[in-house]
Amino acid sequence: MKIAVLGGAGLIGRVISTELVKRGHTVTVMDLVKPEFNVGDFVKVDLKEVSETAERLKGFDFVVNSAQYYFNLDAMKASLKAGVNYVDLGGLFWMTRKQLEMDKDFEREGLLALIGMGAEPGVTNVMASKVKEMYGVPLEIHLRDGWKSSLENFNWSVDTQLDEATMDAPIWDGEMKFLPPFSVSEEVNFSIGKIKTYLTIHSELATFPYTFPGVTKVDWMEGGTGFECVLLLGKLFGKDRGVLKDALRRNGLIGYRGVTPDEVEAAKISFVYENRKVISEFVSFPRGEFDGTQFVTGISPVIALEMGLKGEGVLPPEKVISPIPSWTP
């Protein structure tokens, strides 16, 4: 396939571009800055310039958007204008809701926008779809994410991590409610060990209560190495994050330079029924230059594309990806 990777020069964009090329696809990285790696062609784009971006997207089979989630709507508008199917890694709860409002626009053009096809959201959504297929809609769904590393580097978007640590967190309790971030915590026994997780804002809450009708409670918590520090940094810097990001870059704390990534990530979903609890978990380990979190986030849209995506409109993974695919990796 001929695929454009928006934000392809970034930490996760590098995983996506590298894995697509490995599989024989034609890749064009589109970003404001040229990537520090040699994968496919490069075209400079500014996602705020929707019409110009759309012109550059014409003729591609798919657009994979790995840019900062603030630009998801711009990227979707450009894809729609170019007549190209779209995939992204998700935004936070509020962005996902805005993206879903474009459903009729994509449907009218016979195009698919698969939103949230990363790790969480993404793999977690497909896991949930599988459990629902086997056992039916539960009373409660609890999503938990944890990671462990000997390093405290930022391995994906600084802004997104700070937003997760500082924005009010939605929970579904028969209706949508919002609580302060980190106001609820839970120690979770993952396969990689016990990790303290915290209530934060996340995309699954924007779709699960509606794609699993009848569920009475849905919540999300995450935690791991350095996460308490992210909360502190979020409080200290607020929205004025330029100085923080410059300091992190100068000290080699965004991505990995001269160090071997070792972060391992696990995500667990629990479906609670009247007479049973069904738990499903995935674990992702480092692969070469990528840590476990980066790899599972970047490989997920690649696998989704190769499975053969079908559908029209703006849809989450649990409505698009078959949990029992007729597909061989």
Image (cartoon, rainbow, N blue to C red):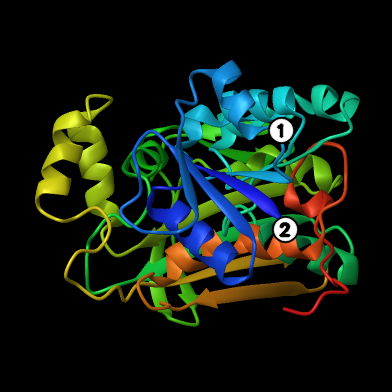
- Amino acid at dot 1: Glu
**Residue in view at x 71 percent, y 33 percent:** 175
Q: Which residue is mark 1?
A: 175
- Amino acid at dot 2: Leu
Disc 1 secondary structure class: loop
Disc 1: CA contacts within 10 A as few (<14), some (14-19) or many (>=20)? few
Q: Quadrant of residue 163?
A: top left
Residue in the foreground of this view, choosing between 180 and 122:
122
Q: Position of residue 8 (x, y in %)?
A: 46, 47
Residue in the foreground of this view, choosing between 96 and 21:
21
Q: Position of residue 214 (x, y in %)?
A: 86, 46
Q: Quadrant of residue 24?
A: bottom right
**Residue in view at x 66 percent, y 23 percent:** 77
Badge nearest the viewer, 1 or 2:
2
* Relative horizontal placement of residue 226, taking residue 136 as reference (left or right): left
Q: Which residue is mark 2?
A: 305
